[in-house]
Amino acid sequence: MISGQRRHFACFTHHQHLCEIVKKICPSVRLHRLDAPALESARA
């Protein structure tokens, strides 16, 4: 990868173990977690 470039990939899953696999493959990954309680409070 050329310096300064970023790659973007989006994946939605409820399988936590897949997130752990991604972190092992790409330690610099940035994961965003959408918790069910947070989503429910946002709807209120």
Image: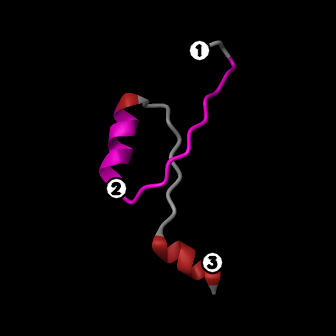
Instruction: Bin the neighbour count of mark 2 within 10 Å (Cα to Cα): few under 14, some 14-19, many 20 and up.
Output: few
Q: Which residues are magenta?
A: 4-24
The answer to whether the residue labelled 3 contacts the one labelled 2, judged by CB atoms less than 8 Å apart, is: no
Spatial separation of the CA atoms under disc 3 and disc 2: 23 Å
Residue where numbered disc 2 is placed = 15
Could you tell me which quadrant the C terminus lies in?
A: bottom right
Q: Nearer the viewer, mark 1 or mark 3?
A: 1
Decide whether residue 5 is among the magenta residues. yes
**Rendered position, 7 above or below 9:** above
Instruction: Bin the neighbour count of mark 3 within 10 Å (Cα to Cα): few under 14, some 14-19, many 20 and up.
Output: few
Q: Which residue is found at the position 48% from the left and 67% from the top?
A: 35
Where residue 30 appears, as percent x and y from the top left, is 53, 41
Decide whether residue 22 is among the magenta residues. yes
Q: Label 3 amino acid?
A: Ala
What is the quadrant of residue 2 in the picture? top right
Whether residue 41 sits left or right of residue 27 in the image: it is right
The answer to whether the residue labelled 1 contacts the one labelled 3, judged by CB atoms less than 8 Å apart, is: no
What is the quadrant of residue 9 in the picture? top right
Q: Label 2 amino acid?
A: His
Checking the image for residue 42, the label placed there is 3
Q: Which residue is found at the position 54% from the left and 73% from the top?
A: 38
Could you tell me which quadrant the N terminus lies in?
A: top right
Q: Label 1 amino acid?
A: Met
Question: SS class of the residue under badge 1?
Answer: loop
Q: Residue furthest left?
A: 17
Instruction: Bin the neighbour count of mark 1 within 10 Å (Cα to Cα): few under 14, some 14-19, many 20 and up.
Output: few
Q: Which residue is found at the position 63% from the left and 78% from the top?
A: 42
Question: SS class of the residue under badge 3?
Answer: helix
Where residue 21 appears, as percent x and y from the top left, is 33, 39
**Rendered position, 22 above or below 13:** above
Checking the image for residue 24, the label placed there is none
Residue where numbered disc 1 is placed = 1
